[in-house]
Image (spheres, grey):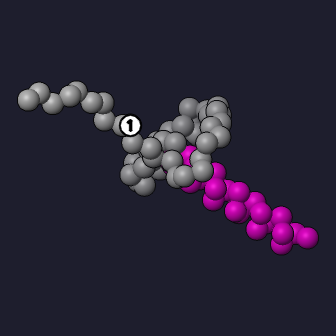
């Protein structure tokens, strides 16, 4: 009996609910910093960029609320 050839599903790395991709431009220096952090965090580039963006948003919100 022959087994059927199936294609393994591609793993999804983003958390559930992440369905709004964005594109951004970085300078060479910024990309180098992102790549350095990516290696330290052992994450993909997109996961590292998302983590940094979320941390930046939280810091921005904290700074904005404390200014009011």
* Residue 34 appears in view: no
In the rendered image, residue 55, in percent from the top left (x then y), is placed at: 63, 59
Magenta stretch prevailing secondary structure: helix
In the rendered image, the vertical position of residue 67 relative to residue 48, given as above or below: below
Instruction: Report helix, strand or loop for mark 1.
Output: loop
In the picture of the structure, the residue carrying the numbered disc 1 is 10
Q: Residues within 10 Å of mark 1 (few under 14, many from 20)?
A: few
In the rendered image, the vertical position of residue 24 relative to residue 51, given as above or below: above
Q: Residue at x 52, y 52 (%)?
A: 15
Q: Residue placed farthest to the front in the image?
A: 1
* Residue 49 appears in view: yes
Q: Is residue 66 left or right of residue 12?
A: right
Q: Residue at x 42, y 49 (%)?
A: 43
In the image, the segment drawn in magenta is: 47-68
Q: Is residue 10 left or right of residue 23?
A: left
Front-lying residue, 4 or 37:
4
In the rendered image, residue 66, in percent from the top left (x then y), is placed at: 83, 72
In the rendered image, residue 64, in percent from the top left (x then y), is placed at: 83, 64
Q: Is residue 32 left or right of residue 27?
A: left
In the rendered image, residue 19, in percent from the top left (x then y), is placed at: 61, 42
Q: Residue at x 48, y 42 (%)?
A: 45
Front-lying residue, 8 or 62:
8
Location of residue 6 (image quadrant):
top left
Q: Residue placed farthest to the right in the image?
A: 68
Q: Is residue 58 magenta?
A: yes
Q: Residue placed farthest to the left in the image?
A: 1
């Amino acid at each position: 009996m022959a087994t059927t050839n199936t294609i393994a599903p591609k793993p999804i790395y983003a958390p559930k609910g992440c369905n709004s991709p964005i594109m951004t431009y970085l300078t060479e220096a910024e990309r180098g910093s992102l790549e350095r952090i990516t290696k330290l965090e052992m994450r993909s580039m997109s996961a590292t960029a998302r983590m940094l963006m979320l941390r930046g948003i939280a810091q921005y919100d904290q700074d904005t609320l404390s200014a009011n």
